Image (tube, coloured by chain):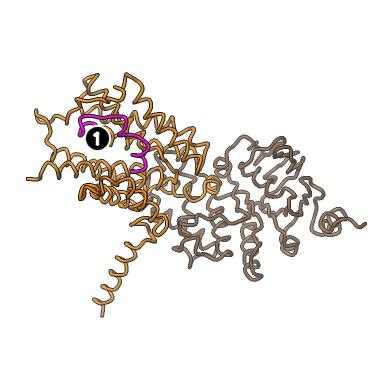
Chain colours: A orange, B brown
């Protein structure tokens, strides 16, 4: 039997993996920097929590609706983001995060600083789901999202995103509708972050505005950058490593933000592509081993 | 047949007139040279025709219809391809993907169609044809950023041709190239013209301009100061003055 502690870590990692994956769609695939991704995570969590506790919606309805609401807000907030690029986009998205967090904090409707409690794990088979079952459920969702990611990466949409990431103006002169494909990335990334928020609320059973602040956005960004921005597995690997790290030793937990910050700096300096980036150590190492092994078996 | 009609086109940047009432027209299957000293407004003209800037006043018609209010992606879908003065291939994509981005112009308008895979046999065959046409066969799988300048310029042309354009805007294709590279590129440009595609060519190398172009438009300080055949331009006193300065 898996211990309750271990299953808690596993569930947290899968939620972070979904989150990191969702940011990777906006920042990795379409090349649009976002420093406010936790806002959409929060919008999802609060939507699910409000629908569940106030309106009596079941888990199976409030979580999809959380994704929908986060996606719609992502589209609306994505529009002002279309007018700005690079550093201005970074500041705009950061501002969005502060505004959203402040609304959760100061509007009594959202429970203020006390947050919202009494959100339970979903029911199925006439009883409450166990934590291992919940883990399997969100793991299945993550796998489905990664399959969708693979489909998109091989589609014209993926190609359009790649061209926007490389050179917006040149992409436009190749017939790529910049606005449409950027908004699509914002909608999809925000909706998936909202989905993660719904899962998070039902798992923690209690949410507060602080869970969705700027610091959280940076944690998500760290996972994406550390693992390998724009790759399929990089953000997942980042979520696993940075999710497990604070759990294996208390000192790391205490200096979490410090360690994340140093890691981010070190990655930018030595491995800007992240652990799984195309020109990074890990893929090179494995490729060389593969090649040398093949050479040996040939001889 | 007249493909592009530019009428009294002006563009101001913060009160500075980069282009001032320029008019001319371009035909299919012909190369129209655009020359003039630095800062004459040549690239501004290209950015106006391709929709990157919108003009302060004037009119641009393509195949008889105004394209003034269209966005760059709409203009490129109508059949106006371009290259850039400082090459801008998609650096981290290979040559094949660079061409694929342009082939996608047929799929991007529909969200449903653009969710389909781009690696389909008939699409890849088409890509190969464009790559071969531009003489890029041996570079197909290489990242654009690792290619020499001359090849990058070919990638830009291959990409623009994949739009199946009626009009191609080439911004200083021979700049920075060695003599042989430039000669080969000029052959490619002639081949493109022979497929009935109209070409606007910005070029500083006079040899190239005089060899390639049927007609030439000369810009200076944003205004058109002359238009005519290469012979007429060569002997035009105003042109000589713009290039060499006034005798005192």
Q: In the displayed structure, would residue A210 be above or below residue B206?
A: above
Q: Position of residue B12 (x, y in %)?
A: 71, 39
Q: Nearer the viewer, residue A175 or A129?
A: A129
Which residue is the site of mark 1? A200
Does A255 appear in magenta? no
Residue A36: image quadrant is top left
Q: Main structural element of the magenta stretch: helix, strand or loop?
A: helix
Residue A66: image quadrant is top left
Does A216 appear in magenta? yes
Q: Nearer the viewer, residue B85 or A12?
A: A12
Residue sitting at the far bottom: A299
Q: In the displayed structure, would residue B86 be above or below residue A82?
A: below
Q: In the displayed structure, would residue A91 be above or below residue A99?
A: below
Residue B33: image quadrant is bottom right
> Which residue shows up at 82% across the image and 50% down it?
B226
Q: Nearer the viewer, residue B235 or B45?
A: B45
Residue sitting at the far left: A1
| Host chain of mark 1 | A
Q: Which residues are magenta?
A: A199-219
The quadrant the N terminus of chain A occupies is top left
Residue sitting at the far right: B248
> Which residue shows up at 16% across the image and 30% down it?
A122
> Which residue shows up at 35% across the image and 39% down it?
A215
Q: Position of residue A151 (x, y in %)?
A: 33, 47
């Amino acid at each position: 039997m898996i211990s309750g502690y271990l299953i808690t870590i596993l569930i947290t990692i899968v939620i972070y993996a979904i989150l990191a994956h969702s940011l990777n769609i906006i920042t990795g695939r379409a090349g649009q920097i976002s420093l406010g991704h936790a806002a959409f995570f929060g919008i999802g969590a609060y939507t699910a929590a409000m629908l569940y506790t106030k309106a009596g919606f079941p888990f199976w309805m409030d979580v999809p609706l959380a994704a929908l609401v986060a996606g719609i807000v992502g589209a609306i907030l994505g529009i002002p983001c279309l007018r700005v690029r690079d550093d201005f986009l970074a500041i705009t998205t950061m501002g969005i995060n502060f505004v959203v967090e402040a609304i959760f904090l100061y509007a009594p409707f959202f429970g203020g600083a006390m947050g919202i409690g009494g959100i339970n794990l979903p029911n199925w088979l006439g009883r409450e789901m166990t934590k291992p079952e919940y883990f399997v459920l969100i793991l299945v969702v993550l796998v489905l999202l990664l399959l969708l990611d693979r489909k998109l990466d091989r589609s014209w949409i993926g190609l359009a995103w790649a061209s926007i990431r490389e050179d917006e103006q040149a992409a436009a002169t190749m017939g790529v509708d910049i606005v449409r494909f950027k908004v699509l990335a914002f909608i999809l990334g925000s909706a998936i972050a909202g989905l993660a928020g719904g899962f998070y609320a039902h798992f923690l059973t209690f949410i507060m505005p602080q869970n969705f602040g700027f610091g959280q956005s940076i944690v998500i960004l760290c996972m994406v950058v550390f693992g390998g921005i724009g790759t399929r597995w990089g953000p997942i690997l980042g979520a696993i490593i940075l999710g497990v790290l604070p759990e294996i030793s208390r000192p790391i937990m205490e200096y979490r933000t410090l360690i994340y910050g140093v890691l981010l700096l070190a990655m930018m300096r030595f491995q800007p592509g992240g652990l799984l980036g195309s020109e990074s150590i890990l893929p090179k190492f494995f490729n060389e081993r593969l090649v040398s092994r093949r050479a040996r078996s040939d001889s | 047949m007249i493909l592009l009609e530019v009428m009294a086109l002006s563009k101001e940047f913060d009160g500075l007139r980069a282009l001032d009432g320029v008019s001319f027209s371009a035909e299919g299957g012909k190369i129209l040279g655009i020359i003039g000293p630095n800062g004459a407004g040549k690239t501004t003209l290209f950015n106006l025709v391709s929709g990157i800037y919108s003009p302060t006043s004037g009119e641009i018609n393509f195949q008889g219809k105004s394209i003034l209010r269209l966005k760059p992606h709409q203009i490129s879908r109508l059949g106006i391809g371009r290259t850039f003065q400082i090459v801008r291939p998609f650096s981290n994509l290979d040559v094949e993907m660079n061409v694929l981005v342009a082939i996608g112009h047929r799929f991007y308008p529909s969200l449903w169609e653009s969710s389909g895979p781009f690696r389909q046999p008939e699409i890849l065959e088409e890509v190969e044809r464009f790559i071969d046409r531009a003489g890029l066969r041996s570079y197909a799988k290489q990242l654009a950023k690792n290619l020499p300048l001359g090849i990058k310029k070919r990638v830009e042309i291959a990409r623009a041709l994949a739009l199946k354009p009626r009009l191609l805007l080439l911004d200083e294709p021979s700049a920075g190239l060695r003599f042989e590279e430039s000669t080969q590129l000029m052959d490619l440009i002639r081949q493109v013209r022979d497929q009935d595609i109209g070409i606007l060519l910005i070029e500083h190398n006079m040899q190239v301009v005089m060899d390639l172009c049927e007609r030439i438009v000369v810009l200076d300080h944003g205004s058109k100061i002359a238009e005519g055949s290469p012979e007429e331009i060569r002997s035009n006193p105003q042109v000589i003055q713009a290039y060499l300065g006034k005798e005192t």
